[in-house]
């Protein structure tokens, strides 16, 4: 009786583990977006962002709505960043220049929303919750 109880307990634990991480969840564990570097340019700040897509889903559309705050917490700029395509199981770096804004003036970048997101199945509405923001610079990157 003890052995059948042990087997039943093992099967229950294995079943719970299967529910906790379905194949779809394993594929889309999240998309890391790291504010990696700010580089001063003449009359601009060059922003380097690292995108890490460890899953098996390729995104054909991936457009971010970003709001930049200065070091006093005041909105300095709003812009969109088209980061597509994001290939499956691939890291990539996207960079863009922010004209008329010095890098030391950027205190925080807010991922305000997703303007567009699509994969092979079509348009998606859940992309914002997949994103894991991070920053390696003094300016924060948050959602």
Image: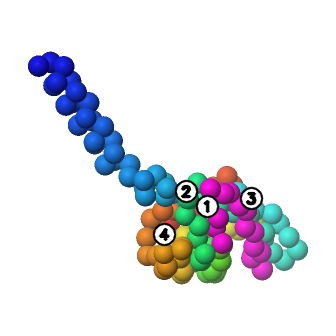
Residue 54 counted in the magenta span: no
The reply to whether residue 20 is visible in this rendering is yes
Residue positioned 61% across, 75% down in the render: 60
Residue 81 vertical placement versus 130 (above, below)? below
Q: Mark on residue 88? A: 1
Q: Which residue is mark 2?
A: 55
Distance between mark 2 and mark 3 Cα atoms: 24 Å
Residue 16 vertical placement versus 89 (above, below)? above
Which badge, 4 or 1, is on the more N-terminal residue? 1
Nearest-to-viewer mark from 3 and 1: 1
Helix, strand or loop status at disc 2: loop
Horizontal placement of 44 versus 92: left or right?
right
Residue 5 vertical placement versus 17 (above, below)? above
CB under 8 Å between callouts 3 and 1? Answer: no
Helix, strand or loop status at disc 4: helix
Which badge, 3 or 1, is on the more N-terminal residue? 3
The reply to whether residue 117 is visible in this rendering is no
Residue 76, image x, y percentages: 64, 78
Nearest-to-viewer mark from 2 and 3: 2
Residue 17 vertical placement versus 59 (above, below)? above
Which badge, 2 or 3, is on the more N-terminal residue? 3
Quadrant, the N terminus: top left
Residue 34, image x, y percentages: 64, 58
Which badge, 4 or 3, is on the more N-terminal residue? 3
In this rendered view, identify the residue nearer to me: 112 or 52. 52
Residue 89 counted in the magenta span: yes
Crowd tier of the residue under label 2, counting other residues whose Cα lies within 10 Å: few below 14, some 14–19, many 20 or above: some
Q: Which residue is mark 3?
A: 37
CB under 8 Å between callouts 1 and 2? Answer: yes
In this rendered view, identify the residue nearer to me: 115 or 140. 115
In this rendered view, identify the residue nearer to me: 19 or 34. 19
Crowd tier of the residue under label 1, counting other residues whose Cα lies within 10 Å: few below 14, some 14–19, many 20 or above: some
């Amino acid at each position: 009786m003890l052995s059948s109880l042990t087997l039943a307990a093992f099967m229950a634990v294995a079943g719970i583990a299967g529910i906790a991480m379905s194949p779809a969840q394993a594929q889309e564990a999240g998309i890391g977006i790291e504010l990696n570097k700010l580089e001063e340019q003449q009359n601009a700040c060059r922003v380097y962002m690292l995108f890490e897509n460890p899953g098996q889903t390729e995104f054909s559309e991936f457009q971010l709505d970003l709001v930049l705050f200065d070091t006093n917490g005041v909105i300095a700029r709003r812009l969109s960043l088209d980061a597509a395509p994001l290939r499956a199981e691939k890291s990539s770096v996207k960079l863009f220049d922010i004209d008329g804004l010095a890098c030391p003036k950027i205190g925080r970048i807010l991922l305000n929303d997703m303007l567009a997101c699509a994969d092979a199945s079509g348009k998606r509405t859940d992309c914002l919750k997949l994103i894991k923001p991070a920053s390696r610079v003094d300016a924060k990157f948050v959602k």
